[in-house]
Image (cartoon, rainbow, N blue to C red):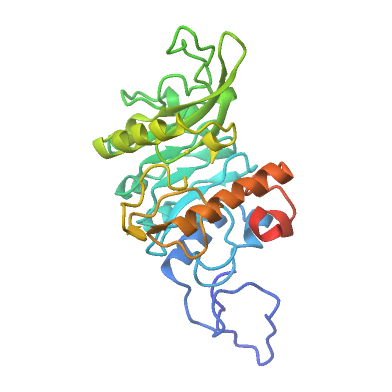
Amino acid sequence: MGPIPKFKAANVTYESNPFCQSIPGVPCAPEVMALLKFLDAINYPSKFASAWSGNNPCDGPWLALTCDVNRKVSTVTLPESNLTGTLSPSIANLDSLTQIILRSNQLTGPIPTNWTSLKSLTLLDLSNNNLSPPLPNFNSTVNLVLYGNPLLNSNTSRPTAPPGEDGSCISPVHSKCDQKFCTKNELGRGGFGVVYKGELDEGTKIAVKRIEAGAISNKALNEFRSEISVLSKVHHRQLSESSDFGLVKLVPDGEKSVLTKLAGTFGYLAPEYACKLTTKADVFSFGVVLMELLTGLMTTNEERPQESKSLVAWF
């Protein structure tokens, strides 16, 4: 991987390797180099080393990465991936990162101090690893989830996880709700918080979306309330998990589309969608839900064979 070195030998063959460039001596793009150094620190796991090829992480199947509308890496998501090794300081060069999720691996060593320079970072989930102190001084806007690490033995007054996310269950927030906010009940994570499974006293199964402190703002609260208002009028057990097509912001009367910030869940977005919310994009997303109902499969699953990891492509 990486750039092709300039060999002194007269005859050199390297076509079978996933180098980022085709010309010897030409360096990879800065984001690619940062990600390859990250892979180096975690001992080049084969499934990622084989998939991270080319000179643009926003082109092709770079597993566990998502990009923003500016085609910059915005999330690194590798939970429960059997990762070993240490955390690379090179991640700090990915200045568009908003979320880093590496929970439940076997990572060791400290958190690189220069990760605190990631100005767009809102979530850093390193729970259930073997990370050691000291804890860098992250901005208060970063939601740190660090339970299950020796790192917590260091002297720090900064909360390392929202209440209940240390693996233990906290008291229900509603007297009729048997829901406990703890890791074992987690169903998934969204842009504003975590969704937990629960059960009402009469036996009704429910999903509870708990907004995270780091995501709270007037805009987030308004969108959250609007979403709940619409969902309350639509009755379908699958719809609550699929909290991303036209429910938060409706197109005004007389308008065919509306410009908006990129929002939604990967796997449900129409391929032509780029900050333009239309009814056609909604129809595409609804079609994905129908596929899920017909097949019983999630829209994306990295554990499935290559040809069926994306439900849309496979279908």
| Left or right: where 202 falls relative to 243 | right
**Which residue is nearer to you in this view: 68 or 113?**
68
**Compared to 117, does 138 lie above or below?**
above
**Compared to 260, does 190 lie above or below?**
above
The C terminus lies in which quarter of the figure? Answer: bottom right
Q: Residue furthest left?
A: 218
Q: Where is residue 300 in the image (x, y as percent from the top left)?
A: 63, 49
| Left or right: where 248 falls relative to 267 | left
* Quarter assignment of residue 185: top right
**Which residue is nearer to you in this view: 246 or 177?**
246
At 47% from the left edge and 31% from the top edge, which residue is drawn?
194
* Quarter assignment of residue 61: bottom right
Q: Where is residue 296 in the image (x, y as percent from the top left)?
A: 71, 41
Look at the image and tell me whether residue 137 can be seen: no
Look at the image and tell me whether residue 256 can be seen: yes
Q: Where is residue 203 in the image (x, y as percent from the top left)?
A: 62, 12
**Compared to 141, does 178 lie above or below?**
above
Q: Where is residue 290 in the image (x, y as percent from the top left)?
A: 64, 47
At 68% from the left edge and 81% from the top edge, which residue is drawn?
15
| Left or right: where 310 falls relative to 65 | right
At 38% from the left edge and 60% from the top edge, which residue is drawn?
276
**Which residue is nearer to you in this view: 74 or 299?**
299
The N terminus lies in which quarter of the figure? Answer: bottom right
